[in-house]
Image (cartoon, rainbow, N blue to C red):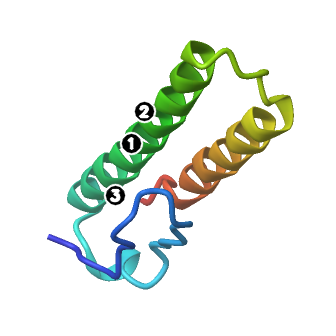
Amino acid sequence: MVTCFRPKSPLVKDETVLVGVRGISEISELYTQYTEYRLELLEERIRHQLKKVREGGIAKKRFNVPEIQSFLGKQKLFIESMMKEIEEVD
């Protein structure tokens, strides 16, 4: 198993990169663990945001467009960074 520093909160920016371990790891295992970890973070972030949206709807608050756009933009960057880390290795 590959381990590194992981923020306790899924809401904290995660900057995990694989460059230092890719050459010394079994790629399939590394990518499986990395992908599971990152998708779990994404799931927790989405659940957190969904809860906020639902609570705002129940409280009849005005929908916060800039906040949701910011959230979605950050998750897009998160996914794009994953795509860059997961590369074919011969």
The residue furthest left is: 1
Front residue of 49/22: it is 49
Q: Position of residue 53 (x, y in %)?
A: 59, 25
Q: Is residue 50 left or right of residue 75?
A: left
Residue 73: image location, x then y, percent: 75, 43
Q: Which residue is mark 3?
A: 34
Is disc 3 placed on a helix, strand or loop?
Answer: helix
Which residue is depicted at the point 63% across and 44% down?
75
Seen in the picture, residue 12 relative to 61 is either above or below; the reply is: below
Q: Are marks 2 and 1 in contact (CB under 8 Å)?
A: yes
Label of residue 44 in the image:
1
Q: Secondary structure at mark 1?
A: helix
What residue lies at 54% left-to-right and 32% top-to-bottom? 52
Examine the image and state in which quarter residue 62 appears. Answer: top right
Residue 47's tag is: 2
- Return the residue nearer the eye: 38 or 17: 38
Q: Quadrant of the C terminus?
A: bottom left
Q: Nearer the viewer, mark 1 or mark 3?
A: 1
Distance from Cα at disc 1 to Cα at disc 3: 16 Å
Q: Amino acid at mark 1?
A: Glu
Q: Is residue 81 above or below residue 59?
A: below
Q: Looking at the rendering, which quadrant does residue 6 occupy? A: bottom left
Of callouts 3 and 2, the N-terminal one? 3
Within 10 angstroms of label 1, few (less than 14), some, or many (20 or more) residues? some
